[in-house]
Image (cartoon, rainbow, N blue to C red):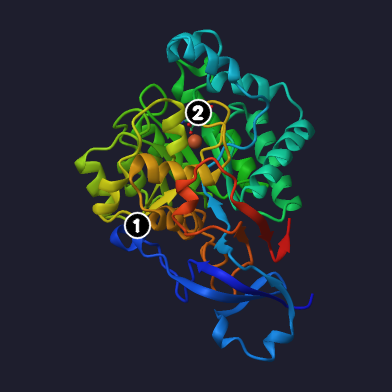
C-alpha cells in the first residue's frame, strides 16, 4: 500500500519518542504537536512533524486534509467482559425499584444469571453477539481491548467463552487480549465447596487453556463473598505456572486485600479500586502494578467513584477502562469513561487521555505497538470532528465527537 499523508492536523496528541508507564504527576503531561502532519505506511506510523517542516518530497504523497481535527491514539480498553449471552436490564429496573443485591441474587440475578444463560448459548451465537459489540466499540474509537471469560463457571462454559475470544482475535483487526476469569463467582453447586471449585479451575480448566493457548492473563474477583485473598493468591499462582500473569478484580466493594495480593504477585494490574485507604494506596504507588479505574461501573452501581486524585498524587500508574459487562457497566464507550473520570474523579483531560491510551496499552502489555503516536507503532487512530480544544472532548460528554477511526492504517 502506498504511504498516506495526513496534513493540517490541528493537534497530534500523545506523541512519544520513548515508552514508559506514565505515573503520578507525569500523567498531566500529554506531549502533542500543533499544526502537524503524519505519514502512515503499511498500517504503521512512519513519520510525523510540524506542517512548516513538511518536505517537498512528502508533499507529493496521497493526502488527507485534517484541518480543525485532533488525532489521538485509539483507546486501549484494558478491562472488559465483552462476551456474554444476554443483557440484564430487568435487574437494572429491579434496582431502580429498590431491590437489594441479595434480593436480585435470590431471584437468580447477577453473575450466576449471566452464567446460566451463557451455558445455554452455543459458541457461534456468542461469537456473533460479541462480534457486533466489538464493531460498535471500534466505531467509538477502541483499537485494542482485553476480554475476560467468567460467565461460564463450568469447564465447558469457560472454554467456550475463551474459544469465542480466540476467534475474535483471529478475525478482528483490533488487538485483543484474553483473560481467564474462571474465579468470577462460585457456582451454586460449589457454594459450600470452595476447594472443589478451585481444584476444578486448577486441574480441569487451566491445563486445557494452556494447551490450546486460550488466555494471556488470569483474573480473580477478590471480594467479600466471592474469592478471599488466600484463594486469589492460590488461583493466580496456578495460572502463573502456565505463564498467565495476573490482572485482578480488587477492592470494588470492600478493602478486599486484592491490591496487596496483586502487588505481591507483581500483577500487571489491579482493577476497580472503588474502596481504597491510605495504606492500600501506598502499597500500589510503590509497585509496578497498574491501577485500572472503571468509573462507569461505579456510576452504574451508584457507588463512590475511585479516588483518582489520591492515587495520582501518591504516584500510582493509572489506566482507565470500561469494564463493559451486562451487570455493572453495560457501556463500551471509552469516551464516556474519559469524560466521567474528569467530571466525577477530577482527573485532568491530559491525565485521562494518558490513562486510556498509553497506560491502557501497558495494562495489556501492548505498549511496544500501541497507545501513543510513535514511529513504528500501529496506526490505530481517532480523528475527532473539528473541536476547539482537547478539553472539549470530556467537557461535551455524551456527544460523539469522533469523525473517523483508523485501525492498522485503514479507516473502519
Ligand atoms: O467487573 N466485579 C465483578 N464482575 C463484573 C460484573 C459482574 C456482573 O454483574 O456481571 C465487574 O463489575
Ligand atoms: Fe470487571
- Image height check: is 170 above or below 18? above
The residue at 27%/37% (across/down) is 276
Q: Secondary structure at mark 1?
A: loop
Q: What is the distance, in whole Å, between disc 1 and disc 2 at their CAs?
A: 28 Å
Residue shown at the point (30%, 41%) measured from the top left? 307
Q: Secondary structure at mark 2?
A: loop
Q: Is residue 72 left or right of residue 87?
A: left
The image quarter in which residue 175 lies: bottom right
Q: Which residue is label 1 attached to?
A: 288
Residue 180: image x %, image y %?
Answer: 56, 40
* Above-or-below relation of 84 to 210: above
Q: Quadrant of residue 379?
A: bottom right
Residue that mark 2 sits on: 328
Residue nearer the viewer, 278 or 66: 66
Please indicate whether residue 122 sits to the left or right of residue 185 in the image: right
| Disc 2: residue Cβ within 8 A of ligand 1's nearest atom | yes
Residue 293, visible in the rendered structure:
no
User: Mark 1 or mark 2, which is nearer to you?
Assistant: 2
* Label ID, residue 66: none
Q: Earlier in the sequence, mark 1 or mark 2?
A: 1
Graded by Cα atoms within 10 Å as few (under 14), some (14 to 19) or many (20 or more), the crowding at tag 2 reads: some
- The verdict on label 1 being within 8 Å of ligand 2 is no
Regarding residue 146, the answer to whether it shows in the image is yes
* Residue 359 at x, y percent in the picture: 45, 57
Find residue 181 and report its horizontal and vertical position in percent: 53, 36
Q: Quadrant of the C terminus?
A: bottom right
Amino acid at each position: 500500500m502506498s504511504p498516506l499523508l495526513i496534513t493540517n492536523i490541528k493537534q497530534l496528541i500523545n506523541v512519544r519518542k520513548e515508552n514508559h508507564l506514565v505515573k503520578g504527576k507525569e500523567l498531566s503531561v500529554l506531549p502533542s504537536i500543533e499544526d502537524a502532519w503524519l505519514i502512515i505506511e503499511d498500517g504503521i506510523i512512519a513519520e510525523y512533524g510540524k506542517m512548516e517542516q513538511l518536505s517537498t518530497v512528502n508533499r507529493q504523497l496521497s493526502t488527507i486534509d485534517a484541518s480543525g481535527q485532533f488525532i489521538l491514539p485509539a483507546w486501549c480498553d484494558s478491562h472488559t467482559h465483552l462476551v456474554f449471552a444476554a443483557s440484564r436490564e430487568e435487574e437494572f429496573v429491579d434496582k431502580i425499584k429498590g431491590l437489594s443485591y441479595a434480593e436480585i441474587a435470590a431471584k437468580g440475578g447477577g453473575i450466576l444469571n449471566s452464567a446460566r444463560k451463557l451455558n445455554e448459548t452455543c459458541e457461534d451465537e456468542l461469537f456473533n453477539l460479541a462480534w457486533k459489540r466489538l464493531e460498535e466499540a471500534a466505531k467509538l474509537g477502541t483499537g485494542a481491548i482485553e476480554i475476560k471469560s467468567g460467565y461460564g463457571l463450568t469447564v465447558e462454559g469457560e472454554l467456550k467463552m475463551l474459544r469465542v475470544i480466540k476467534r475474535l482475535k483471529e478475525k478482528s483487526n483490533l488487538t485483543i487480549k484474553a483473560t481467564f476469569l474462571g474465579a468470577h463467582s462460585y457456582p451454586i453447586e460449589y457454594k459450600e465447596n470452595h476447594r472443589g471449585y478451585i481444584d476444578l479451575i486448577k486441574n480441569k480448566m487451566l491445563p486445557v487453556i494452556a494447551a490450546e493457548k486460550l488466555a494471556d492473563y488470569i483474573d480473580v474477583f477478590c471480594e467479600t463473598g466471592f474469592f478471599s485473598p488466600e484463594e486469589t493468591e492460590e488461583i493466580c499462582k496456578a495460572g502463573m505456572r502456565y505463564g498467565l500473569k495476573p490482572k485482578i478484580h480488587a477492592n470494588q466493594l470492600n478493602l478486599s486485600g486484592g491490591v496487596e495480593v496483586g502487588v505481591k504477585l507483581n500483577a500487571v494490574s489491579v482493577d476497580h479500586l472503588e474502596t481504597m485507604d491510605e495504606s492500600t494506596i501506598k502499597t500500589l504507588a510503590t509497585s509496578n502494578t497498574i491501577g485500572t479505574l472503571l468509573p462507569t461501573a461505579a456510576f452504574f452501581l451508584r457507588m463512590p467513584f475511585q479516588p483518582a486524585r489520591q492515587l495520582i498524587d501518591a504516584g500510582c500508574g493509572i489506566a482507565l477502562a470500561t469494564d463493559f459487562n451486562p451487570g455493572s457497566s453495560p457501556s463500551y464507550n471509552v469516551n464516556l469513561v474519559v469524560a466521567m473520570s474528569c467530571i466525577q474523579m477530577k482527573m485532568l483531560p491530559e491525565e485521562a487521555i494518558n490513562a486510556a491510551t498509553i497506560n491502557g496499552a501497558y495494562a495489556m502489555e501492548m505498549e511496544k505497538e500501541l497507545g501513543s503516536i510513535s514511529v513504528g507503532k500501529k496506526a490505530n487512530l481517532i480523528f475527532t470532528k473539528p473541536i476547539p480544544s482537547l478539553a472539549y472532548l470530556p467537557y461535551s460528554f455524551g456527544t460523539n465527537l469522533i469523525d473517523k477511526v483508523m485501525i492498522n492504517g485503514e479507516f473502519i
